[in-house]
Image (tube, rainbow, N blue to C red):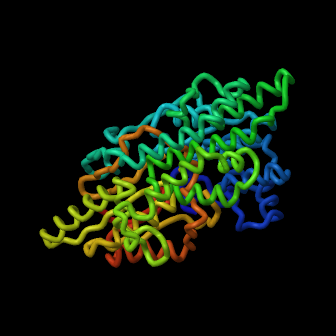
């Protein structure tokens, strides 16, 4: 609705020519809209379904505008919509918009390839058209050294990955850019290698394109966990491995989890998570880790705690109130962060996550305060993120719950909200330090 109003006020497109296309509108009503309107504002999943079911004639689409274009990675619906329109033979233009295109060349290139981008326009904060809308801020990067436990677990995790890498290398299924040690591997690289292998098998009919799907799936799952280890810490890794152990009891991954290398990895994680100081009384009443142990297992949480306490102590000394936002990739890590921060009298933290409840992105924990400090691991391993960092152990929030959290944050009931990427996208949060 906001974008429909903006189109009318900026370009003069009347509301009678526009339509909203989303799952809230029934399929028959959407078909009528596709036939009678000319400008559409929709969710990519619904547009994809309408093209596939024939309600929308993709050949008539001449321009596709994609907001938050950095999501065009992997299996996200943006990519599927582009492929469907292209496959229909339509002559169309794609315009992608993003304030956060990616953290490195590789991730940006993936979006460029997915959306067939041939020209890039860049607007910087110093540009005349932008700077009037940007608040002055100071950015400080704080590098946090990995704990010894993380380094040890990482070496053990690579030992689990090695049989998969060796098998795929021997079968000529892994390209040269994936090294033999698995040190720099990430889920996107594995998915790209899988797609390249399938295409090669199909083009020369030299083998089954899906012969190594189980190996690729196992490698993609474990490389994502390797990235999570550096980004989110041992606690999140333990949660995700527990889900794998529960859900994957057969196949390549199931067999791998029955091996001695995986058993050794699980033993190391177990020793790191039940209380590094040997005192099991530090565990929560529900068996989860206490704030003390969470900080021991993830030094970034300890640094985050220190940064925010220092910030709010300064504000208190000046007789001022203050508020801060913490962004994190995964819902599981949001829970951990809230638990750590809520242990401090000055901090009143509340989670803010998306509405989906399904199981689930390459950003490390960051804080927005008056110095705009960001807390990063010194590792450069990056995970691929395609949506709000979901975890089935952490329920989503209903829309009225989200609105209530924002209201209470504005009013000062909470002075810290901890968000997944959902907090970055168009929410009117108001003043924040």
Left or right of residue 76: residue 277: left
Q: What is the x, y in percent for residue 80?
A: 72, 44
Q: What is the x, y in percent for residue 47?
A: 73, 53
Q: Which residue lies furthest to the left in this view?
A: 318
The correct choice, above or below, for 342 with respect to 215 in the image is: below
Q: Which of 178 and 59 is in front in this view?
A: 178
Tell me, yes or no, if residue 426 can be seen here: no
Looking at the rendering, which quadrant does residue 311 occupy?
bottom left
Q: Which residue is drawn at 32% across and 50% down?
A: 374
The correct choice, above or below, for 329 with respect to 155 in the image is: below
Q: What is the x, y in percent for residue 292?
A: 34, 66
Count of numbered labels shown in the rendering: 0
Quadrant location of the C terminus in the rendered image: bottom left
Q: Residue at x 39, y 77 (%)?
A: 408
Q: Which residue is drawn at 65% across and 57% down?
A: 245
The correct choice, above or below, for 134 with respect to 390 in the image is: above
Q: Residue at x 45, y 78 (%)?
A: 285
């Amino acid at each position: 609705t906001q974008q429909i109003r903006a189109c009318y006020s900026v370009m003069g497109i009347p509301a009678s020519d526009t339509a909203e296309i989303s799952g809230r509108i029934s399929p028959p009503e959407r078909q009528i809209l596709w036939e009678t309107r000319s400008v559409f504002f929709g969710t990519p999943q619904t547009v994809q379904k309408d093209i596939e079911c024939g309600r929308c004639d993709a050949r008539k689409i001449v321009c596709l505008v994609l907001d938050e274009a950095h999501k065009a990675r992997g299996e996200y619906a943006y990519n599927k919509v582009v492929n469907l329109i292209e496959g229909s033979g339509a002559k169309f233009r794609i315009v992608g918009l993003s304030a956060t295109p990616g953290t490195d060349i590789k991730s940006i290139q993936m979006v460029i390839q997915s959306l067939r981008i041939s020209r890039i326009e860049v607007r910087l904060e110093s540009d005349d058209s932008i700077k009037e809308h940007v608040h002055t801020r100071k950015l400080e990067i704080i590098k946090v050294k990995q704990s010894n436990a993380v380094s040890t677990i990482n070496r053990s995790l690579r030992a689990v990955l090695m049989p998969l890498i060796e098998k795929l290398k021997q079968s000529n299924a892994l390209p040269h850019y994936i090294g033999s040690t698995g040190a720099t591997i990430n889920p996107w690289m594995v998915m790209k290698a899988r797609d390249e292998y399938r295409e090669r098998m199909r083009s020369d009919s030299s083998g089954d394109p899906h012969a190594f799907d189980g190996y690729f799936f196992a490698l993609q799952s474990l490389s994502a966990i390797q990235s999570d280890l550096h980004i989110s810490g041992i606690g999140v890794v333990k949660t995700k491995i527990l889900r794998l152990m529960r859900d994957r009891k057969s196949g390549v991954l199931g067999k791998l989890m029955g091996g001695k290398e995986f058993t050794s990895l699980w033993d190391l994680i177990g020793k790191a998570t039940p209380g590094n100081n040997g005192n099991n009384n530090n565990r929560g009443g529900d068996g989860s880790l206490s704030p003390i142990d969470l900080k021991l297992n993830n030094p970034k949480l300890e640094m985050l705690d220190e940064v925010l306490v220092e910030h709010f102590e300064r504000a208190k000394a000046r007789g001022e109130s203050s508020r801060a936002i913490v962004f994190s990739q995964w819902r599981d890590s949001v829970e951990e962060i809230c638990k750590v921060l809520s242990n401090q009298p000055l901090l009143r933290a509340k989670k803010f996550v998306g509405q989906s409840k399904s199981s689930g992105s390459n950003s490390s924990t960051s804080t927005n305060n008056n110095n705009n400090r960001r807390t990063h691991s010194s590792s450069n391993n990056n995970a691929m993120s395609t949506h709000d960092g979901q975890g089935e152990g952490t329920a989503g929030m209903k829309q009225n719950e989200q609105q209530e959290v924002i209201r209470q944050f504005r009013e000062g009931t909470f002075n810290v909200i901890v968000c997944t990427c959902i907090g970055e996208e168009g929410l009117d949060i108001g003043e924040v330090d």
